[in-house]
Amino acid sequence: MQLRRGLAVPPALMAALFLVLGTVFLVLGAAGPAAASVGVGIQAAPVRLAGLAHPGQSATVQVFVVNSGSQPESVRIAVQRLSHGQGRPVPASWVKTGAPIARLAPHHAVRVTLELAVPGDAKPGAYLSDVVATGYAPASAGRANLGAAAATLLEFRVADPAAAFWPSVFRQSFWALLIVILLAAVALAIYKSGLRLRVEREPVGYGTAEERGG
C-alpha cells in the first residue's frame, strides 16, 4: 500500500467529499466538558478501475481517507462485502493493502493506492465489494482503544479471455487477406501491362591454364 503525504482538509470541504460512517467520543479527564472524538472518513464516490480487469494481470486503484476526529489516529484499509448489489464479491486476497497507515493527524487526509491482482482463473463478469477504512486511537490509561469505520463501494469487471481472443484473430486474418489482395492486384497489373521479364544465363569461361597463370 502506498501513501501520499497528508493534507489538511477544511471541515466544510471534508463534509462534502467524505462519507463518515462512524464517530466515537471519548471524555478525557474526570472534570470539564472537553471531549475528544475518534472518526474516519472515506470518499463517497465508488472506487472503480479505468477499464476492464484482465485475468493474470494487476491494476491499481486509489482511495481518499481522512481523520475526521480530533486526535491522531492509525487507519487500516480492508476489502469486504457490505453492500447489496449485483456482482461477485471481491476476494480479499486479490487486494494488497500492505501495513496499516501511519498515524494521521486530525482533519488530515491521504490518498491510498491499492493493488488489485486478478488471478488467471478469475471468472469474467462484474465484481462488487466495499473498501473499508477503520481508524483507531489509543484511549487514556485504563480504557480500551476506540475505533470508527467508513466504507465506499469497490466495483469493476473482469474481461472474458475468449471474447478478447476472437477479435484478435479476426484482425490478424484481415491484414493477411489484405496483403494477399494487394499482391494479386500488383501481379494482375503487371500481366495486363504486357511487361515481361527475361532472364538470360551466359556461361562463364574460366580460360586455359596459361591464361589463368598470366
Image: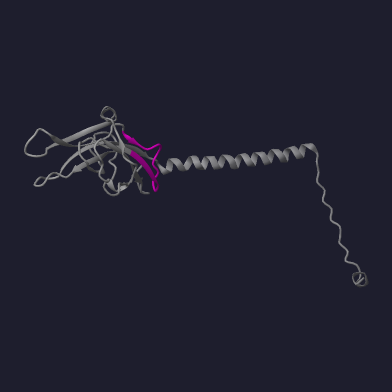
Q: Total number of numbered labels?
A: 0
Observer able to see residue 171: yes
**Is 94 or 16 nearer to us in this picture?**
16
Give the x, y percent position of residue 202: 86, 57
Height in image: 51 above or below 142?
above
Image quadrant assignment for residue 146: top left
Give the x, y percent position of residue 13: 29, 28
Would residue 213 be counted in the magenta stretch?
no
**Is 147 or 29 nearer to us in this picture?**
29
Which stretch appears magenta? 46-62
Give the x, y percent position of residue 107: 25, 35
- What's the coloring here? one colour
**Is 49 or 14 nearer to us in this picture?**
14
Observer able to see residue 127: no
Q: Residue furthest left?
A: 30
Relative to residue 127, is residue 145 drawn left or right?
left
Residue shown at 57%/39% (left/top)? 174
Relative to residue 119, is residue 193 drawn left or right?
right
Quadrant for the C terminus in the image: bottom right
Residue shown at 26%/27% (left/top)? 12
Q: Residue furthest front?
A: 32
Give the x, y percent position of residue 189: 74, 37
**Is 202 or 135 nearer to us in this picture?**
135
